[in-house]
Image (tube, helix red, strand yellow):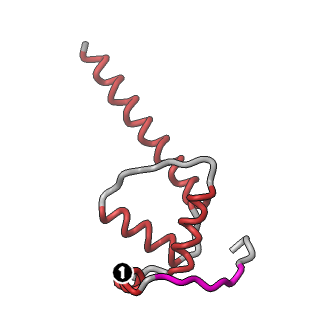
Amino acid sequence: MSQKLKRISLMIRDDQHQKINERGLNVSGLFRDLLDDYLSEHKVTLSVSQETKEVYDMVISNTASSDEELEKYLKESLKNLLKEKIEYMIDIHKRL
């Protein structure tokens, strides 16, 4: 972990605590990720499947990872998507 952490006390409702525990999430990691999102000047909001959201929450909250670390994988995925779309469009053009 490259950034120094500060220990704080945080109060949440019982129902929130239960849901976080049921999902196997780390409260500190989840809070850091949400706080980073809230404070960020540059945001991308994606609608994803429930399964993808669960994987995202599990990885980010339990590995002390950040969206900043995830960004390089997102950029690579977007490049791959663009390449696929270009190839598809070229194929369509050839059929004309």
Q: Of the residues shown, which amino acid type is indicated by label 1?
A: Lys
Q: Residue at x 53, y 84 (%)?
A: 11
Q: Quadrant for the C terminus, please.
A: top left
Residue 56: in magenta span: no
From the viewer's side, name the closer residue of 12 and 37: 12
Quarter-of-image position of residue 5: bottom right
- The picture places residue 3, in percent across and down from the top left corner, at 73, 71
**Residue shown at 53%/47% (left/top)?**
75
- Is residue 1 toward the left or the right of residue 32 in the image? right
Name the quadrant of the N terminus. Answer: bottom right
- Residue at 44% x, 70% y is 57
* Residue 44 image point, x, y percent: 50, 48
Residue at the far left: name it: 95
Q: Main secondary structure of the magenta part?
A: loop
Give left or right: position of 13 versus 64. Answer: left
Q: Give the magenta-colored segment's residue range.
A: 6-12
The residue carrying pointer 1 sits among few (fewer than 14), some (14 to 19) or many (20 or more) residues within 10 Å by Cα, namely: few
Q: Measuring from the top left, give residue 61's x and y in whole percent.
A: 51, 74
Seen at 63% across and 48% down, the residue is 41
- Tell me the SS state at disc 1: helix
Q: Which residue is mark 1?
A: 19
Q: Is residue 10 magenta?
A: yes
